Image: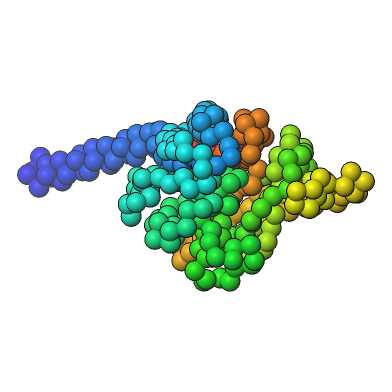
Amino acid sequence: MGGTMKKQLLLTLLLLLATAAGGWLVARAADAPAKPLRVLLIAGGCCHDYATQTQLLKAGLESRLNAVVDVDFNPDKSTKATFERYAKDDWAEGYDVVLHDECSADVTDPAYVKRILDAHRGGVPAVNLHCAMHCYRWGDFREPVKPGADNAGWYEMLGLQSTGHGPQSPIDVSYVDGENPIVKGFAGWTTINEELYNNVQILTARALAKGKQFQKPKGKKGQPADPDAKGEEVETVVVWTNEYGPTKTRIFSTTLGHNNETVGDDRYLDLVARGLLWATGHLEANGSAADGYGK
């Protein structure tokens, strides 16, 4: 066998070995498990049992998803609860999604709020729960804010402006976009006593569910309500999505979740889990988790 032929055979053998090795490496990469989603849950402030609810959310999400939930909890029960991490520009670095569950209605430092929003405007997805809708507000915030106004930033991230709520009583939840993978296959349900948040205006939000609650008129300040008042049925959007900023960052929000029993309800946790998967781009069209991200 000539030297030229030997070289050709050797080259062919090396090529076959390289191809086989490459195929093996690709197969091993395909078989490698997906890395868990890194979830940052920020909670604390007024009016809620966050010490319990953070644990309900962490356990509920980690049991449903391939995810690790880190909790940043501030036990401050005032409306001025702040978080040290928000003092840094890179406060969300390393996380795939931030779950806002704080209740900081009277935190009004524009620079502080801008740092929070800049992370989301730059592409970090968010999931917002309940009182997160009533945070970081100033000026005449009870009136419809104007897009681009100094006090509109937080509402623009949410995609919807809410400023208050009705009494604690059951809410009938109905899904209005049944083909959306976040709520596909979900049946309507009635909560325990919960707070129905108002809708001052819908900015860029896409409604997924509405809540209906019977509300009796409140009495004048210092006076009891009229027991003969008929009251009325009030309906607002309670679950929605938004795309925020130039990167069209995915934002999922629900105003439900005041009481522990609701936060621990499987229907609630299933909803939040799907919203989180959608926000991070790991939700299939049929409502199931993408390969490697469900349990």
**Nearer the observer, 57 or 276:** 57
Residue name at image x 54 percent, y 58 percent: 137
Please state if 280 lies on the left or on the right of 184 as rendered.
left
Is 123 drawn above or below residue 268 in the view shown?
Answer: below
**Placement of the N terminus among the 4 image quadrants:** top left
Please state if 139 lies on the left or on the right of 13 as rendered.
right
| Image coords of residue 104 (percent x, y) | 51, 48
**Nearer the observer, 197 or 218:** 218
**Nearer the observer, 21 or 285:** 285
Residue name at image x 64 percent, y 66 percent: 143
Please state if 96 lies on the left or on the right of 186 as rendered.
left
Decide if residue 39 is in sight here. Answer: no
| Image coords of residue 77 (percent x, y) | 51, 39
| Image coords of residue 123 (percent x, y) | 43, 56
User: Which residue ends up furthest to the left in the rendered image?
Assistant: 3
Please state if 201 lies on the left or on the right of 114 as rendered.
right
Decide if residue 193 is in sight here. Answer: yes
User: Which residue ends up furthest to the front in the rendered image?
Assistant: 222
| Image coords of residue 141 (percent x, y) | 59, 63
Is 166 drawn above or below residue 267 in the view shown?
Answer: below
Residue name at image x 58 percent, y 40 percent: 47
Residue name at image x 75 percent, y 52 percent: 221
